[in-house]
Image (spheres, rainbow, N blue to C red):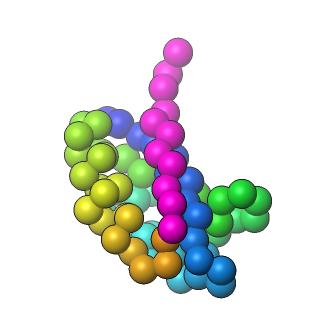
Amino acid sequence: MVQAYILIQTEVGKASAVAATISSLPGVVRAEDVTGPYDVIVRAQSDTVDELGRMVVAKIQQVEGITRTLTCPVVHL
């Protein structure tokens, strides 16, 4: 299982709507709107890194109101 945090910047005033939409996507564990340099932080999981990448590009980045994403895979050292 691959897990990642996805940091999202949105258009002004769109954070709550983006978080609500993303929270219903398969593979999304949690999506919350936050303050700071990013507007939404998502915790996601998938079976492989490739599947995670497809989720980000094909599903998450297609949500209306998103301007930028940064995917941070979780590592266990």
Q: Name the spot of residue 2 as percent of width and height, x first.
A: 35, 36
Residue that appears at 45% across and 36% down: 73
Find out whether residue 68 is within the magenta segment. Answer: yes
Numbered label tally: 0
Q: Name the spot of residue 65 as percent of width and height, x first.
A: 49, 78
10 sits left or right of 60 in the view: right
Q: Which residues are magenta?
A: 67-77
Q: Nearer the viewer, residue 62 or 44?
A: 62
Name the quadrant of the N terminus.
top left
Residue that appears at 65% across and 80% down: 12
Residue that appears at 25% across and 52% down: 54
Prevailing secondary structure class for the magenta stretch in the rendered image? strand
Is any part of residue 7 visible from this angle? yes
Q: Decide: is 73 above or below 7.
A: above
Determine which quarter of the picture holds residue 33: bottom right
Find out whether residue 6 is within the magenta segment. Answer: no
Residue that appears at 48% across and 26% down: 75
Q: Name the spot of residue 35 as percent of width and height, x first.
A: 75, 64
Determine which quarter of the picture holds residue 50: top left
Q: Name the spot of residue 27 as percent of width and height, x first.
A: 33, 56
Q: Nearer the viewer, residue 9 or 4?
A: 9
Is any part of residue 31 visible from this angle? no
Of all residues shown, which one is farthest toward the right? 36
13 sits left or right of 27 in the view: right
